[in-house]
Image (tube, grey):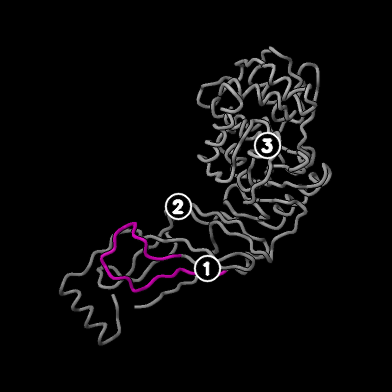
C-alpha cells in the first residue's frame, strides 16, 4: 500500500489564482478582475478593503428593481411619483448627477432604470427607493440585507445613490460579485447597461462608462466618483465568448479611469485564456483495487471543468492523479477515492476530487485468502 501517482496527458483544472510573479501593476487604489465563467481571479489589489463606492453602489439599487421585475412585483410600464425630497436632494437643485425629474411627476420604471444607468440620476434612485420601500432609509436596509444574501460580506448601505456617507461602504471584490449577479440573473435587463445615451424631459445625456465607446466588447456597468472615493468603474466585457469583470477605484481623473480600465481589461484578454476540458461524469483515470472481484475502478469527476490560465503557462502544466493504493474493497459508487493535482508556472497548485464510477464488491473468504497468498509469494495484489 502506498501513494499511487498517474500523470495525465490531458491538462485541466478548475479555478486558479495568478501568483504575484504574474500580476500586473495598477495605479488604481483598489482593483479586482475575475473571469466570469471560471471564477479565476486575474488581479487583486486591496480588493477586500472597505472603500466608498460612490455611484457604483447604484448597482445594488438596480438589482432590487430587476429582482422585482423578474418576479412580477413590478412592470416596466409602472409609474412612480417624484417626491420633493427626490427632486431637491437627488436632482438638479442639488447640482448632482440627475435625470432632471420634476416634483410630482409620474415616471415609468423603465425610464428610471435608464436614468440610473445612463445618467447616474440620484433623483431617479431616490424615487425608486421611496416607491419600493417607503423611504430611502428602509431601502438602504434592504440593500444591505440583499448584499449578505449574495455573499457580499463587506458591504453596507446608507442610501440608494452612493452619496457620501460613512455608512456607505463596499469593496472591489463585493462589487464584482454584484456585477456578476446582475449579468447572470437578469439577462433581459442587463442590456440597458450597454445603451450609450438617453433623452428625458428634453435633455439628452451620454453614458459615462468610457469602455462602451471603445472596440473591446464592453457592455456594462457603472462609473462612480466623489472626492473621497476618487474615480471608479465597475465594468464588464465579452470577447470570443469569454467575459471578464473588472472593478477599479481611487483613480485620480476621468482620463485615468478610462485608460487604466482599458489597459487592465486588454491585459486580461491578452495574457489569459479559457480551456474547456472535461464534462461532469467523465472518467478521468482508474484506481487499482485490493481484495476485490475487479482489478480497478474508474475515477470520474463531478463537475464540468473549464480552466483559465496564463497562455504562457499552459504548455508547462503538470497534472497527476493521486491516491493511496491499491484501494481495499468494498468500494461504493460516488465514494471519493483520489484527487487530481495541477501545477503550472505562475499559478497556485489546486486539487480536484475524483470519485468511484461504480460499486466494487469485496472478495469472499476464499478469494481473500487466495489474494493474500499471491501477495506473499508473488507480490501480486488484487
Relative side of 112 to 359, left or right: right
Which quadrant holds residue 104? top right
As displayed, is residue 120 above or below residue 368? above
Q: Which mark is residue 280?
A: 2
Give the structural element (helix, strand or loop) at label 1. Answer: strand
Of helix, strand and loop, which mostly describes the magenta segment? strand
- In primary-sequence order, the first of circles 2 and 3 is 3
The residue that appears at 67% across and 61% down in the rendered structure is 311
Magenta stretch: residue 330 in it? yes
Relative side of 135 to 200, left or right: left
- In primary-sequence order, the first of circles 1 and 3 is 3
Q: Quadrant of the C terminus?
A: bottom left
The residue that appears at 73% across and 30% down in the rendered structure is 120
Which quadrant holds residue 292? bottom left
For disc 1, the neighbor class at 10 Å (few under 14, some 14 to 19, many from 20) is many
Which label sits in the foreground, 1 or 3?
3
Q: From the viewer's side, name the closer residue of 218 and 289.
A: 218
Give the structural element (helix, strand or loop) at label 2. Answer: loop
Amino acid at each position: 500500500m502506498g501513494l499511487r501517482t498517474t500523470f495525465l496527458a490531458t491538462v485541466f483544472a478548475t479555478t486558479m489564482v495568478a501568483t504575484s510573479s504574474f500580476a500586473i501593476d495598477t495605479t488604481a487604489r483598489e482593483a479586482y478582475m475575475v473571469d466570469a465563467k471560471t471564477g479565476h481571479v486575474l488581479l487583486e489589489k486591496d480588493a477586500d478593503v472597505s472603500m466608498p463606492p460612490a455611484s457604483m453602489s447604484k448597482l445594488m439599487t438596480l438589482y432590487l428593481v430587476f429582482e422585482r421585475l423578474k418576479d412580477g412585483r413590478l412592470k416596466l410600464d409602472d409609474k412612480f411619483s417624484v417626491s420633493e425630497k427626490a427632486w431637491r436632494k437627488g436632482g438638479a437643485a442639488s447640482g448632482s448627477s440627475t435625470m432632471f425629474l420634476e416634483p410630482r411627476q409620474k415616471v415609468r420604471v423603465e425610464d428610471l432604470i435608464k436614468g440610473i444607468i445612463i445618467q447616474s440620476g440620484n433623483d431617479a434612485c431616490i424615487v425608486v427607493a421611496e416607491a419600493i420601500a417607503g423611504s430611502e432609509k428602509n431601502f438602504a436596509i434592504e440593500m444591505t440585507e440583499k448584499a449578505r444574501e449574495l455573499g457580499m460580506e463587506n458591504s453596507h448601505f446608507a442610501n440608494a445613490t452612493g452619496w457620501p456617507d460613512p455608512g456607505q461602504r463596499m469593496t472591489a471584490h463585493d462589487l464584482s460579485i454584484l456585477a456578476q449577479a446582475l449579468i447572470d440573473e437578469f439577462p433581459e435587463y442587463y442590456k440597458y447597461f450597454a445603451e450609450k445615451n438617453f433623452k428625458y424631459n428634453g435633455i439628452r445625456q451620454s453614458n459615462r462608462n468610457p469602455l462602451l465607446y471603445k472596440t473591446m466588447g464592453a457592455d456594462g456597468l457603472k462609473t462612480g466618483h466623489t472626492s473621497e472615493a476618487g474615480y471608479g468603474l465597475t465594468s464588464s466585457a465579452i470577447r470570443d465568448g469569454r467575459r471578464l469583470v473588472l472593478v477599479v477605484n481611487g483613480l485620480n481623473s476621468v482620463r485615468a479611469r478610462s485608460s487604466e480600465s482599458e489597459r487592465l481589461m486588454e491585459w486580461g484578454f491578452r495574457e489569459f485564456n479559457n480551456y474547456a476540458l472535461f464534462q461532469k461524469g467523465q472518467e478521468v483515470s482508474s484506481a487499482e483495487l485490493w481484495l476485490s472481484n475487479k482489478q480497478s475502478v474508474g475515477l470520474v469527476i463531478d463537475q464540468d471543468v473549464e480552466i483559465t490560465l496564463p497562455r504562457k503557462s499552459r504548455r508547462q502544466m503538470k497534472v497527476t492523479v493521486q491516491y493511496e493504493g491499491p484501494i481495499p474493497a468494498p468500494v461504493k459508487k460516488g465514494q471519493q477515492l483520489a484527487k487530481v493535482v495541477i501545477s503550472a508556472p505562475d499559478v497556485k497548485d489546486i486539487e480536484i476530487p475524483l470519485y468511484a464510477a461504480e460499486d466494487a464488491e469485496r472478495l469472499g473468504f476464499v478469494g481473500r485468502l487466495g489474494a493474500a497468498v499471491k501477495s506473499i509469494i508473488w507480490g501480486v495484489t488484487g
